[in-house]
Image (spheres, helix red, strand yellow):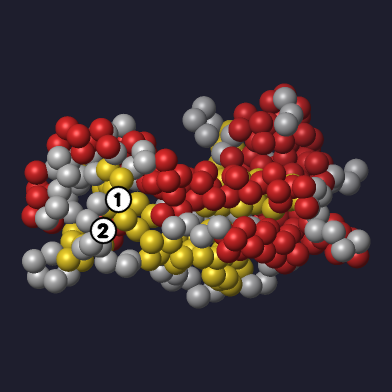
Amino acid sequence: MKTTLDELQAFVAVVDTGSITAASELLDQTVSATSRTLGRLEEKLQTTLLRRTTRRLELTEEGSAFLQRARAILVSVDEAEELMAARRVRPAGRLRVDAATPFMLHVLVPLVDSFRATYPEVELELHSHEGIVDLIEKRSDVAFRIGALKDSSMHARPVGISRIRVLASPAYLARHGTPTDIQQLAQHVLLGFTQPDSLNEWPLRDTGGELLRIQPAIASSSGETLRHMALAGQGMVCLSDFMTRADRDSGKLVPLFEDQLLDVRQSIHAVYYRNTALASRITCFVDHVVTALGAKPFD
């Protein structure tokens, strides 16, 4: 009896998600169905692929070796589907997109409807992470990264540039006053990031002429969390224009130190591996994003 693609997909899904329950949700199956599929695969191969303990699943040596082959087979199937789609001149198949939560919410999510209307055969999976992720580990096809790039093994396409500004809500300024001098920041509640520490450099000059490095009174790993805290009047924040344009336009967040603010901008790139077999899907999605952002700059 031959191994089926469903069995390979179930096995890989269990490994990637870490549990049969999570894999069943990913595959839109019942837990019992996923468990039976995995058991059937092991029976066909006459080997144990995963050790089941009370706390987690672990790959056996045989399972680790089979996982590499299973992934290669599934990639080959994706490539074959992509080839057929290319012959129809219509990108199709699954595209896994990764981005930091603020960029996902404020930039990518509003573009989904128009993208789907143009490319209805592309199945989007949207994943959000606060830090830089490994595309292979997270099974992402393309990621949007903000700031300097380091991984030279990846293809990077510029998407846009976004300025950073110091902001506060009218409610916060009404209670604490509007600072006009950088020295007055010591009297205010400053909201910042837990990491990387470079995000706590604000586009203002300190007494030594360098970028001002703040010590946050409240810190978070998420820019979106900091944005919501600023909107709630809980402190002053420094965020990128792409996530605050609507707040600035509506007056919910007010730019500060406009006559002293340095023109510091963050580059935004779409990144993916050079040898990807998903070129048409990636290209059509990135093209769509670049076109939309070009028509409506962040600032």
Camera sees residue 211: yes
Q: Residue at x 77, y 47 (%)?
A: 117
Amino acid at the residue labelled 1: Pro
For residue 34, side relative to residue 297 (left or right): right
Q: Which residue does the numbered mark 1 point to in the structure image?
A: 255
Tell which of 93 and 16 is nearer to you. 93
For the residues bearing labels 1 and 2, Cβ distance under 8 angstroms: yes
Amino acid at the residue labelled 2: Glu
Crowding around mark 2 (Cα neighbors within 10 Å: few <14, some 14 to 19, many 20+) is few
Camera sees residue 69: no
Tell which of 104 and 47 is nearer to you. 104
Quarter of the C terminus within the rendering: bottom left
In the displayed structure, would residue 49 be above or below residue 282?
Answer: above
Q: Residue at x 40, y 64 (%)?
A: 266
In the displayed structure, would residue 205 be above or below residue 117?
Answer: below
For residue 81, side relative to residue 189 (left or right): right
Quarter of the N terminus within the rendering: top right
Q: Quadrant of residue 196?
A: bottom left
Q: Position of residue 132 (x, y in %)?
A: 45, 57
Q: Quadrant of residue 31?
A: top right
For residue 213, side relative to residue 138 (left or right): left
Label at residue 258:
2
**Numbered circles on residues, count:** 2
Q: Position of residue 33 (x, y in %)?
A: 76, 27
For residue 251, side relative to residue 242 (left or right): left
Q: Secondary structure at mark 2?
A: loop
